[in-house]
Image (cartoon, coloured by chain):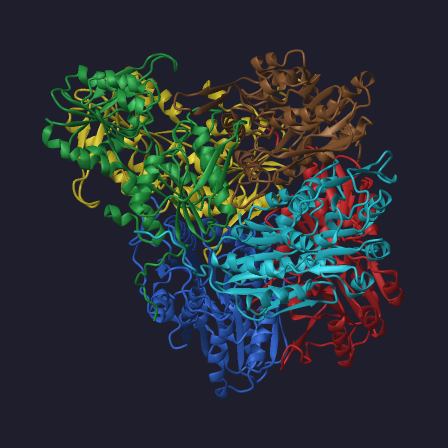
Chain colours: A cyan, B red, C blue, D yellow, E green, F brown
């Protein structure tokens, strides 16, 4: 009497796509993938540093996606996202999804000492109170951050994008070994290594003095005479990976590749990375890399796009189809 | 059997005072008034533009006040406030009060056209979700903004500070008249005029074309041969007051005084104001005026301190005593 | 691949229209405009003063609009609205919109002295807790009240209805001038004047003694030998407009018209207005005017209907189409 | 090291007592019991039917109790209570307790047919959203209503007051039997009977036709030649008890006493009761009985005061002492 | 212009049916009635007593119903339901309905003494916080429990199923009389009696000593030489009904039938009931009866299925059609 | 004027200590440490598997701590905790703190595949909705779980207890090395190693086939001829540590010590551990170890008590003193 078969209806009205000002190229790529233009909106920064948003057309009863990464300038980009979310909600959108390729403050996710914040939870609360019904993001620093939200979300990973690309390089490598630059990344590093069928080694950082004392680094595992893939989820100022590369080199590594999802690349990362004996830097466009930084890394930098991934997930979310089956899960 | 008489107990534990980085001088003045030092905390801005806060001592079971104005850089200052509020809440403070001399985004308080935000409500929601139990602020653009909060608060006014100072100048003025620079300030302007026992006039701005067409200004009321007090709640870029001063001068005004609570003074306000035929600019320290701007207005600028007002309200809030009776209300 | 074009589907199930007992004529007009009959319901007032509501048919999965104004008897009408909202929610309506032509307690929107309520916020909270998903209302006393709600809403204005009608009268007027009866209405009065291309004047009320002392009125601007349009958002007991009309007459006004949205008309408003030298009273039907009051104003009273406006907005809200574009916005 | 012994400190600041306008005599009695005067407040009903409240003094950090019953006029009394609660919360009271001797709408506590409200839950939600931290009430129609609140409360009973009084009458009665006037009161009727050590009988009401058909009444149990105590939680229009008294009389009852907690007494209750062959009507002052109604029942009416009960509970709630032990529980 | 006629669209996406592990047969019957198979899911109990749930397919944008009764083992079954609800919500179901044939803890619905819980409210809160948008349940111990939920729900009754079956037995009975085994069931017992057009009698239980003293039972009404239908909402250990059957037998009852909705049947209920002189035990399958218990009652037990009722309500809830009209209401 | 010095007042009334039935010995030890007896309460499990709680004395206005671990039977223990929390809240406790030595479901803290729950967040939500104002717990599986709560809490660690004990053993060990049994514990393992000043090695588990294929284990780092300390946060069935011990033994380890905080020890953990060549098993009493399991591990098992830690934190929480400074932080 009732059919369990799936109808392909758009249950939340039409799709509508907006972008903040933080990652216009990525947003345009997603729009192109979807074949759905970005909707017009004004984003104005007044002389008093207040942002103002106005939508060019109504979103009543529609299924709206706002693409905004929360990289530098972090607070402005975050506030822009929040204001857009509230504007869409007050304009009676049927459903509002925040698409945040890089979620700021994800490293402030626990109280590892007393009297400090858990800012990632605060950010989740702010996104909810502004009016998001759902969110889509990529490679959170810790998977647990999904539990900071009470709204549902799609926490995606660019892992397959990075391993697929790496697999193509493998025939040109000699005895590759994966090195996790940070012990907090040990488990994900192991997954990376397992996927490309390579062994893994770890770098242990140990601080004997206070927080301001230099840390002693130890390599645990074998890299001698091997090509090394240093992996991490993000590179900020490049301090840690810089030490990691020097250490593996000192331990006899041959070619070194640096692989990470989020190119935060705060200064002086571009300088540090450009001076290191790295063969290739493989990352994604969850954060736009300013031209001057990209120039500094010229020839070494390979940026893979997450736009098809985000686009496909948006389609499926809109049509009520499985996202998991994209990954054979 | 039960006494209705008031005991002077501190029902919420001890008082503890923190300050963000936005208005250190005002915070220090308030601390001095209270005879209670500012508690130590680290506020760090990391290279990736993320803020980090750490309190130097525990606030368990204490009655905490955080002084932070939300002037430029607005988003950083706001986020700093929010992170401090969350940190204090997670550290189990008994009560957390946000003391915000100038509340940002207060002009985005209604949807006067479709598809725009009510950002002041968003800011109120953010302050609540971060963990404030109460708030104290000064001269909101519209009194209704108090209704955006569901937590209780003390919305104070620097009105008495400004009228008290003005009254002292009156013997030196000739036929003073108050001019409301904006019709939205008409009612408060009337109150100002009534308090100093002067008549009032209004400036009507009317736009015949679109938003980008220049507006026609009309003076309604009498200023000829009179000393004029142009009053408003804040001065941003100084465009409106600049036109107002020119208009009253053209209508025969003698000396012109400019009186407002919040010195937002976005550029080129300092240039505009310095070039105007103004006798004195009277304002408060709800927002710190950078030295270079203060220098540009040298000789004309009179900054009255709201520190004693904030300090007294904090004491009374802490001790559970009436704030209203400070104003004979 | 995805179409951004708008489909005209009713995303929230069928439309269903209910009315409380407060404004049956207006509700019937709206129903006629929509071509959708009012759904049956019982509203019973028991001898113990408790209200009881029963719907005649199910509203599961439907898009329901309840029309109920909150004029006198205010508390009964408000409670009736709240009970209907809860009943609809508990009966699993897909979406419930409260259509409130006149929102009670809108003048209690800020704490202008200590230890008083912000009842408009309380009313907003009550409407939300009862189960409204959205609301539609007309000409709030202050636009900021929209920020008291956390649900989205359409705050409409009968402004165009009043100015359109007024424009037709203009050819018969001589040198018309708009007079704002209250300084709180100064800005909206200016907009009215600008739309009909007339100058504006203000009435300033100043109280030298306590709240119970009579206030001194001053006219600021020119009305001599002109036709005067006294404008306000509502007329309650008619005291203020009565004084205003007498003042402009004393200042040489010719014909006087009284224009306002909400005919609260608490006694003795009908007596006061009937005795005043007013040529015409122009208002709307957001509040029903009892026959005996209408009779007292016979010949002077022109009531314009807001039913087409409400009806059109309901259609658009139901179909997910823009409301803003009704006003070329 | 830690003492488990109880200190008698007032942990929520000083006690402060307010009363609405619904039951001034009861409020005065409670105040007298507490030896704590009622705090001053203005309650004004404006011509537009809007209520306004202003407190005469600050309640910051104090432990406030508002006494307001919600009898007729129900909606005005309820709204008055809600506005007072919000005012107290916004004035930063440490704790606000609503003391509601009679809670309106308690009979609308379940959906016994489709498409009707559960208004008692709505009322509970309204009391919470207005700002009550706790509530105190008496003899809810169903004990489950306590579960409608998410705030804690003291749901008291005047049961002991009524049975204590009844026990004093017992020596003058012959073979007393308790009769539950309504099957919904069967269990509480049994408790009453058990406390005074009398048997119980029931009146069964059965409707063969629709809701508007008269119901057939059957007495189940024995009343012949016995004194009868008809008990219920409230008497509204007196229809049911009127039938009950006539039925027990027809079944041979001797003297009939009518005992109930809440004297709702909607007209024509006073007429009905005055015409019935009842020896005594025993009730409480949770609802004030207007003088003309009391006069109609002259000689038969015995009103027992709940003021000492409410007063004692307020003291204990304020001092953090057990309420249960008042009843040896 | 707008049609009020009902379209039969499935507004919440496709229907999807899940079952927990508590009542697999009933769930299968409901699925068969709907013609919609149960969706696959893993429910795993790990050695550490933690439950784990995984859905076999995506539920994005779908209208999901989870069938899970909360009988013994109560806490495991409840937790399983809650985890399934959260999983469905986090997987972005459009709407999640908890179908709970028997709701646990319904007897803990009020504080009849101090310092005890209202666990039924806690259970309602847990179901809401886990993510249910709606719920469907049968014959709550008290109708008021519906008011413990703030989400809408369908509280159904198996009353018609039981009375329809009973009516078929009536021609074979002699002078049947309904007996309410508990005074709390008096009103529902009366309704049962009225529907089958029989008289009613009551059993009064009175405890003279403490809670642990045996209670004295009195029969109020007539059963001599009559067939007796003992009715209640559930039978737990069978202690009360056991006493009731013995009492009516002692009072001269002929055949005794035992009729109740929820067969909780905690041990030693099966033993007690099997030893009683009962002609038939009529109940439903809201709780599965273990084979060994069913065997003990062999020949006496008649289990009526609620599956068609639940199935029909699910269809109507899904299609947005009235549930009330199933019962001519 | 105001003193910033700390008064040692108990701001939340008196302390009151309750215990559930899950860890009576630990609760008694904490009570002894505090010098404050456990308050009386009944916890009853009815035949229908429903729990019932009754407090022996009032907790009005007091600062209550409930000690209940959530080990096996997990769901019963969790529900017992929740019911106690609600009972305390409804009895108007001033503050309720849940003291949960071992928090169940902490391993279900992220969605590492689609369509699974985040049960730890659900548990946090349940604890909050039941009424806890704060919580105290020990060694969460992931520190991020603290961000699942919106209430403040003290997440403690038994780390110092374990390392202090281990340090005393060090003089008797030869070349000790720490081995992290799971890569997810890599960072905490490193901290352990750094504290006792030993090197670290890792065990990498890699699965080539599906979830049901055996995993290949690799040791990364050096253990040959060394004493090995296998560390983890908890031991469940002992499968992983069993493999770990065998691997390090095969790699030449000398004495092996097993160190973990939470002795979950689900069967057949006791059998596995008893058969392994382990010198000592060092753990804590966050979960009671049943006598038969303790017996199976006789001679090897060292259980360190967390009671002084919990007791000290409760005192400090009650008195509003810093917890962080217990750890020199």
Residue A103: in sight, yes or no? yes
For this rendering, which residue is in front, C51 or E316?
A: E316
For this rendering, which residue is in front, F246 or C310?
A: F246
Residue E64 is situated, as x and y percent measured from the top left of the image, at 42, 47
Residue B97: in sight, yes or no? no
Residue E189 placement: quadrant = top left
Residue occupying the point 81% across, 60% down? A297
For this rendering, which residue is in front, A62 or D120?
A: A62
Q: Is residue E230 above or below residue C97?
A: above
Residue A251 is situated, as x and y percent measured from the top left of the image, at 84, 42
Q: Is residue C37 above or below residue E321?
A: below
Residue C173 is situated, as x and y percent measured from the top left of the image, at 51, 86
Residue occupying the point 13% across, 23% down? E226
Residue A47 placement: quadrant = bottom right
Q: Is residue C81 above or below residue C219?
A: above
Query: In the visual, does D76 lie left or right of B262?
Result: left
**Total numbered badges shown on the rendered structure:** 0
């Amino acid at each position: 009497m009732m059919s369990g078969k799936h109808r392909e209806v758009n249950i939340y009205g039409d799709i509508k796509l907006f972008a903040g000002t933080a990652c216009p190229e990525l947003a345009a790529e997603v729009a192109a993938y979807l074949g759905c233009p970005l909707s017009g909106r004004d984003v104005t920064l007044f002389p008093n540093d207040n942002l103002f948003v106005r939508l060019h057309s109504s979103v009543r009863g529609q299924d709206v996606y706002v693409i905004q990464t929360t990289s530098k300038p972090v607070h402005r980009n975050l506030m822009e996202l929040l204001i857009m979310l509230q504007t869409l909600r007050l304009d009676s959108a049927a459903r509002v999804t925040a698409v945040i390729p890089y979620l700021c403050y994800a490293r402030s996710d626990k109280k590892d000492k007393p009297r400090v914040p858990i800012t990632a939870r605060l950010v989740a609360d702010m996104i909810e109170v502004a009016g998001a019904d759902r969110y889509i993001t990529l490679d959170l620093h810790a998977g647990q951050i999904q539990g900071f939200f009470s709204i549902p979300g799609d926490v995606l990973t660019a892992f397959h994008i990075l391993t697929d690309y790496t697999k193509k390089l493998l025939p040109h490598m000699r005895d590759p070994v994966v090195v996790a630059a940070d012990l907090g990344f040990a488990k994900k590093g192991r997954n990376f290594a397992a996927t490309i069928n390579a062994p893994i080694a770890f770098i242990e950082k140990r601080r004997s003095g206070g927080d301001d004392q230099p840390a002693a680094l130890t390599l645990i595992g074998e890299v001698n005479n091997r090509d090394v893939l240093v992996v991490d989820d993000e590179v900020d100022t490049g301090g840690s990976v810089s030490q990691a590369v020097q250490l593996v080199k000192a331990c006899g590594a041959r070619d070194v590749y640096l692989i990470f999802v989020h190119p935060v690349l705060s200064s002086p990362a571009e300088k540090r990375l450009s001076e290191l004996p790295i063969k290739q830097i493989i990352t994604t466009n969850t954060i736009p890399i300013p031209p001057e930084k990209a120039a500094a890394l010229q020839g070494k930098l390979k940026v893979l796009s997450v736009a098809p991934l985000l686009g496909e997930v948006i389609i499926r979310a809109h049509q009520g189809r499985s996202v998991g089956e994209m990954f054979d899960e």
